[in-house]
Image (tube, rainbow, N blue to C red):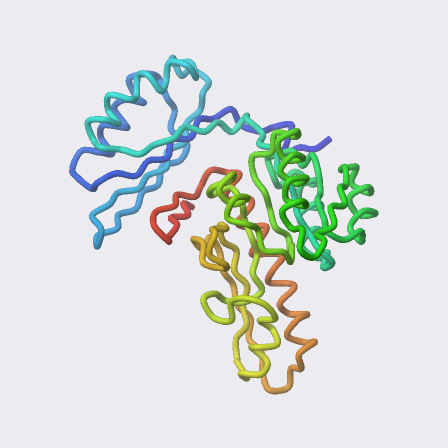
Amino acid sequence: MNFTLDCIANTAILLIDCPDRKGIVAAIADFLYAHGANILHADQHQDNNLGLFFMRVEWDMDGFDLSREDLPLQFQPIAERLGMRWRLEYSAVRPAVAIFVSGSLHCLVDLLYRHQSGEFACTIPLVVSNHSQARPLAEFYGIPFHHVPVEQGDKTGAERVQLDLLERHGVDLVVLARYMQILSPEFVARYPQRIINVHHSFLPAFSGARPYHAAFERGVKLIGATSHYVTEVLDDGPIIEQDVTRVSHRDQLEDLMQKGRDLERVVLSRAVRWHLDHRILVYGKKTVVFD
């Protein structure tokens, strides 16, 4: 029995951002109280420089007197009055996640294990790779594997196949688990803020290819990994999570790469979990990640 998945909560999650002003929290709390909500989590943040307010509220749907259809209609007047951008999510809805990978499998191994153990509230209907090494691993976990080679000079053809696969499987989120191909702007535009990448450096340092080599040549004392949403600008999307570890002059290039792989696994899995838990709000080039 998978305890985590069998006991998933039936909650609603409201995420908002709006101009900061008095009365926002009170308006939301009063609305939820009036309809019988039992608030389980509430978190907020102010960006004083921009005068913006951010909030995440999660409540139990048991005993709540508004249906999923009625809730947006009833909340809309409050949102309009306070100038909110807002969205509603439900913990019982399990999004479909596609994992893209190339030859390095450590992040894929970690994601598939965490999914099987119930850490991720999602389905994984497919693994896509431009290499074939990941096939036995995907098949071990019972997930269909699709080998889509990216021929030199025909990336458009490969992306056409990939996008067709994503559409046929109703994919909501694409995770690049060390997928070493640059996605086209057209591909990225199909999944805005729904493609998560892990980059093997502490961005913005050492962006682009071979960051461990660049870090080794520079003689850094810290190396890191970064998980971020993908935009059409390479390695420039809003950062979700980062972590670092210390290195020294004794560490060779291979040591940096080995230590970095541990960081990559953790940083990517955190970002995926927070996205699936609806804990992230994006504004400009930044993110707010709620506890």
Question: Residue 276, how many percent across, how many down?
Answer: 53, 38
Residue drawn at x 35%, y 41% as measured from the top left: 43
For the residue pair 65 and 154, the one nearer the viewer reads as: 154
Question: Residue 8, how many percent across, how many down?
Answer: 58, 29
Q: Is 153 positioned to the left or the right of 200 in the image?
A: right
The image quadrant that residue 255 belongs to is bottom right
As drawn, which residue projects farthest toward the left? 22
Q: Is 89 positioned to the left or the right of 8 in the image?
A: left
Determine whether 74 is above or below 165 in the image. above
Residue drawn at x 29%, y 22% as measured from the top left: 76
Question: Residue 188, how many percent across, how many down?
Answer: 51, 45
For the residue pair 134 and 192, the one nearer the viewer reads as: 192
Question: Residue 165, how many percent across, how many down?
Answer: 67, 35
Q: Is 30 positioned to the left or the right of 176 in the image?
A: left
For the residue pair 115 and 63, the one nearer the viewer reads as: 115
As drawn, which residue projects farthest toward the bottom? 249
As drawn, which residue projects farthest toward the front? 153
For the residue pair 153 and 210, the one nearer the viewer reads as: 153
